[in-house]
Image (cartoon, rainbow, N blue to C red):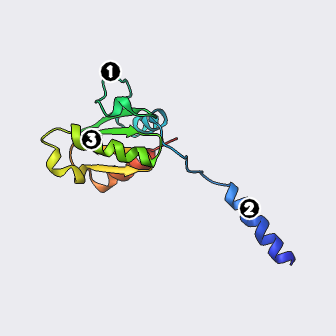
Amino acid sequence: MRRVLILVILGLVLAGCGDTEPDAYKAEGTAECLRDEGYRVTTDPQKLGVVEANTANGGLLAFKPGNALRIAFGSDSDDALGIERGYRRFVSKKVRPHITDVMRTQKNAVMLWTVTPPLEEMNQVFACLKG
């Protein structure tokens, strides 16, 4: 019995430790992380596209040599589906044929690159998604 109690307490302690995943990602925290990773980032609604400028948790535009990234932050994962539809509708004719290669969704964040990013770059951006 004592052993079971110790395991239960240990499990509860471990569950409360470490990084907790936010319910929804947001533009500001993500923008700061991307800047720390060497991206040039703006969250100014005047400089964003129609999709990013009109999302619940903001949007951003990030630049790194050779690629640009747009991220729109909806209120939740259901909202992300609408954002994906928006990107499909408003994306440039140049990007439209390969949109499935350049668009990714994580929870409420929809990311759209100009060209297909290398896996390392994609992972770097996913790691920067903040609540």
Residue sitting nearer the eye, 5 or 88: 88
Q: Residue at x 14, y 50 (%)?
A: 97
Element type where label 2 sits in the image: helix
Instruction: State the separation of the CA atoms marked 1 and 3.
Output: 18 Å
Residue 129 appears at what percent x and percent y?
45, 44
Near mark 2 (Cα within 10 A), the count class, few <14, some 14-19 or many ≥20, is few
Tell me which amino acid carries mark 1: Gln
Near mark 3 (Cα within 10 A), the count class, few <14, some 14-19 or many ≥20, is many
Element type where label 3 sits in the image: helix
Residue sitting nearer the eye, 38 or 43: 43
Most extreme residue toward the top is 46
Answer whether residue 40 is visible to the viewer in this image.
Answer: no
Instruction: State the separation of the CA atoms marked 3 and 2.
Output: 42 Å
Locate residue 54 relative to residue 97 in the image: left or right.
Answer: right
Residue sitting nearer the eye, 31 or 48: 48
Locate residue 123 relative to residue 5 in the image: left or right.
Answer: left
Tell me which amino acid carries mark 2: Leu
Residue 4 appears at what percent x and percent y?
80, 75
Answer whether residue 76 is visible to the viewer in this image.
Answer: yes
Of the image marks 3 and 2, the number of the one nearer the N terminus: 2
Q: Residue 46 carries which label?
A: 1
Against 13, is 98 above or below?
A: above
Instruction: State the separation of the CA atoms marked 1 and 2.
Output: 46 Å
Q: Which residue, given by chain and number where applicable, does mark 2 sit on? A: 12
Residue 80 appears at what percent x and percent y?
39, 45
Q: Do the residues labelled 1 and 2 touch (CB within 8 Å)?
A: no
Q: Which residue, given by chain and number where applicable, does mark 3 sit on? A: 87
Of the image marks 1 and 2, the number of the one nearer the N terminus: 2
Of the image marks 1 and 3, the number of the one nearer the N terminus: 1
Q: Which residue is drawn at 24% across and 38% down?
A: 65
